[in-house]
Image (spheres, helix red, strand yellow):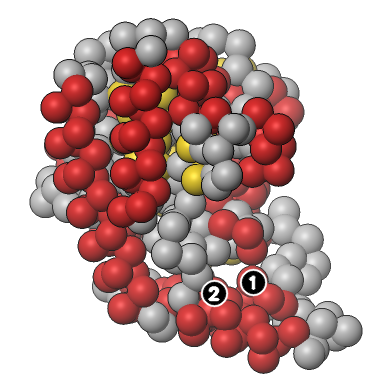
Amino acid sequence: MQDLEYKGGPSIEEVRDRVEADHIYKLSSNENALGPSPKVLEAIQKTASTLHLYPPREDDSLREHIAAYHGKGLTRDHIYTGNSGSEVVELLNRAFAQPGDEVIVSSPTFGLYKRLAGKLGLTLVDVPLDPDTFEYNIPAILNEVTDRTRLVYVCNPNNPTATLLLKPAMEALLDGLPERVIVVADEVYYQFVEDSDYPDSIQSVLDNRNLIVVHSFSKTFSMAGLRLGYGIARPDLVKAVRHFRCPFHLNALANAAGHAALDDEQHVSDTLSMVQQGKTYLMGEFDRMGIPYWPSHTNFIMFKPEMPADELIEGVLKRGVMVRPTNRNGYDGGVRVTIGLPEENRAFIQALEHVYQR
C-alpha cells in the first residue's frame, strides 16, 4: 500500500486565495448540500441555553433511539456511539488489537485505516481491490490471515471508488475467517445504496457473526460539523468497545441533534432524491464528454481525467469548484466529486469543460 497520511479535505477558507471566481462550491468532502434537517437546527437551538451544564453522563437514550430507528430486534446493547465514524473505528481498534497485531485492508480505500493502524502500532496488510472493477478479492484476503490477524476492513460502499461488496462475497468472508478475527463493515454511505444484493449487516450482527458495522451522522443526516457516529455489533463486542470511551463522551448538541435527525424521515428522503438526480446528471455529462468514471453507490463519483489529476483539480478550483484527488486513498490519477445541488453540479461541469478546452 502506498505511504498514505490521511488528512481531511481543506476548507473553503484554506483555498480561497487560489480561486478566481466570486463563489466557491465545495464538492470535495462528500457533505450533504441540503444542510441539516430543520428539526436538527431546532433541537440545537433548544439545547444551546443549557451549554453551561455537562451533557448526559450516559448515551443510553440515543442508543435506544438508534436501535429503534433500525428495528429488527436491535437493542441499545448492540450500539456504541462516538465522536464521528472515525472515532467509532478508532475505539474498536483499541478494543480488539494490540501493537504488533495485523489488520487487513484493500486499497484503494479510506486512508484513515492506515493512519489509525500506525498510530496504534498495528501492522497493515494490504490486499488490493481488482484494478479495473474495484471488487474485493476474498480468497486473497483469507489467504493473508495469520495468527496475528485481528481485523479485516470492508469499506462498503467504498471510498473513494463508490463501489460495493455484495452479499455473497461478504458471506464468503465471514464464513472463511477464524473466530478471533472481526470484520469491520464501514457503511457510512449505506443509505445511498439501492442494490438489492447489498449485505444485510444488521441481520449478520443479530446472527452473532464477528462483525462490527460503522455508521455516521455526517452524510445523509448532514451533521458532519457535529462529529457523531455509532457502531453496531454483538453486545459482548459493544461492551468491550465502550470500555475505551471517555466520560461525557458525547457533547450536548450532538446528542440532541442525533435524536432529531433520526426523527426526520423527510430530510433523508429529500437527500436521497437530490443525490439520485444529481448522479444521473453528472454521469450523463461524463458520458457526453467521454470522461471515464465508475458507477456510484454513494453521494460522490470517482472519475479519471485524461490530464494529471492535480492539474484538473487546480483548474476547476480557479473557477470556484473544489474537488478531491484520490491518491491519498491509494488510487493515482483519479478525482472524486461530491454530488451537490443542481447549481453546484452545473458549476462543476462548466468548470470541467473550461479545463478540458484549454
Say which quarter of the image contains residue 288. Answer: top left
User: Percent x, y for residue 261?
Assistant: 47, 76
Front residue (pair 299, 137): 299
Asked whether residue 306 is in view, the answer is yes
Question: In the picture shown, does residue 67 fall above or below 85?
Answer: below
User: Percent x, y for residue 230?
Assistant: 52, 60
Task: Calculate the distance from the C-alpha at mark 2 to the C-alpha at mark 1.
Answer: 6 Å
Residue visible at 20% across and 33% down in the picture: 285
Drawn side of residue 134 relative to residue 344, left or right: left
Residue 35 badge: none
Q: Are marks 2 and 1 in contact (CB under 8 Å)?
A: yes
Badge 1 element: helix
Front residue (pair 296, 151): 296
Q: Amino acid at mark 2?
A: Gly
Residue visible at 57% across and 57% down in the picture: 224
Say which quarter of the image contains residue 336. Answer: top left
Residue designated by label 2: 258
Q: Amino acid at mark 1?
A: Ala
Drawn side of residue 6 relative to residue 304, left or right: right
Question: In the picture shown, does residue 260 fall above or below 105?
Answer: below
Drawn side of residue 65 relative to residue 92, left or right: left
Question: In the picture shown, does residue 128 fall above or below 313?
Answer: above
Residue 254 badge: 1
Residue visible at 64% across and 71% down in the picture: 254
Q: Residue furthest left?
A: 196
Front residue (pair 333, 116): 333
Question: In the picture shown, does residue 138 fall above or below 144?
Answer: below
* Badge 1: residue crowd in 10 Å (few <14, some 14–19, many ≥20): many
Asked whether residue 211 is in view, the answer is no
User: Percent x, y for residue 291?
Assistant: 23, 20
* Badge 2: residue crowd in 10 Å (few <14, some 14–19, many ≥20): many
